[in-house]
Image: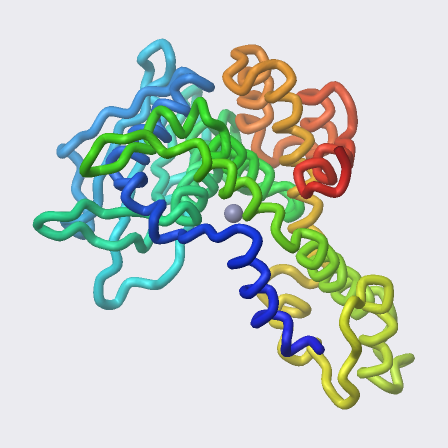
Amino acid sequence: MPWDKAYYSEKLKQKKLDLDEEKLKPYFPLEKVVDGLFKTVHKLYGLQFVRTDNIDVYHPDVQVYEVRDEDGSFLALLYMDFFPREGKRQGAWMTSFKTQYKKDGKDHRPHISLVMNFTKPTDNTPSLLSFYEVTTLFHEFGHALHGMLSDVTYPSLAGTNVYWDFVELPSQIMENWVYEKEVLDMFAQHYETGEKLPVEYLEKIKQTKQFLEGMATLRQLGFGYLDMAWHYTYPGKINDAEAYEVQAMKKTRLLPHVPNTMMSPGFGHLFAGGYAAGYYSYKWAELLDAHAFSIFRKNGIFDKETARKFRHLLEQGGTRHPMELYKEFAGTEPDIKPLLRRAGFIQ
Ligand SMILES: [Zn+2]
């Protein structure tokens, strides 16, 4: 039954993977991870990050970097606010204090901020990240790149101001680099011994990513179908909401429906939070990022020409249709196979 899922999933995970995520943390001290992230971005786009104390900040924890392009020209200011404190919102996000725009022949460069809630360092232990937090940092940094590299005229179309189902491509694609040995070798080192992340841990991390991926995929698709169903049918025609929900999710249901229960009333994304008929965008963005990264993998994960094309896509913000931009980068429309392969569904 649906309520047994979490319990048996955990048992199966312990039996099959036996990965203690706490054991990974000493390999991910925050400073090293940030350094590795900067190196990754430098190898891809030539960007340089210079710490500066000349900019006012709203809290002493906040660090500011001047971001410079390959030729040394000023590109953006990057604020990073990593630690929790009283009154600070939970979670992780990118935001823009000043959006890029051009006026009277002048290019006004953006001020971008990354906000996280990592464990604060103590006197004898640095801030240590979980693997999930490392991927979160790379993810949010992808949004930040979208903002920092922007090269458009109107601020309303700059950076992340794109169609809803396109905004997670720049962020999700960044997560792919975290699973690459070449990238992890740049920063995943035990903070006490200096030992590199053992290869068997990396293998387990990769297996964990595919663990129960079939169920997870069905779940995401089911939510997408349900969301679309509510927005595609005139509500006046629906006499039995529960039956309507059951029908909408029929194709993806794995576990029995429990009569007199519904998920729609508690599913906040159906009508609020900007989703409303946009929930599918999670899966769609995964399809895009898997295909886009497969092109990097084919040409080399740091291939200059591929990175140049992807940067061009990032620079355009919402000034052009996403599919047009994507085809310019990939040479084709996105293909579903890399997503299925990454999920472990096909070879
Ligand atoms: Zn995101």
Q: As displayed, is residue 295 above or below residue 285?
A: above
Q: Looking at the figure, which quarter contains the C terminus?
A: top right
Query: Which colouring convention does the figure follow?
Result: rainbow
Q: As displayed, is residue 220 above or below residue 168?
A: below
- Disc tally is 0
Q: Residue furthest bottom?
A: 260
From where the camera sits, is residue 317 visible?
A: yes
**Residue 121 x/y as whole percent:** 17, 50
Q: Looking at the figure, which quarter contains the N terminus?
A: bottom right
Front in this rendered view, residue 183 or 97: 183
Q: Residue furthest right?
A: 237
Front in this rendered view, residue 253 or 13: 13
Residue located 13% across and 52% down the image: 122
Residue 141 left/right relative to 251: left
**Residue 130 x/y as whole percent:** 37, 49
Residue located 78% across and 67% down the image: 254
Specify the quadrant of the image occupied by residue 188. Answer: top left
Residue 321 left/right relative to 121: right
Residue 88 left/right relative to 218: left
From where the camera sits, is residue 278 visible?
A: no
**Residue 141 x/y as whole percent:** 42, 38
**Residue 7 x/y as whole percent:** 57, 72
Q: As displayed, is residue 330 above or below residue 23?
A: above
Residue located 57% across and 15% down the image: 300
Residue located 33% across and 15% down the image: 73
Front in this rendered view, residue 233 or 342: 342
Q: As displayed, is residue 10 above or below residue 327?
A: below
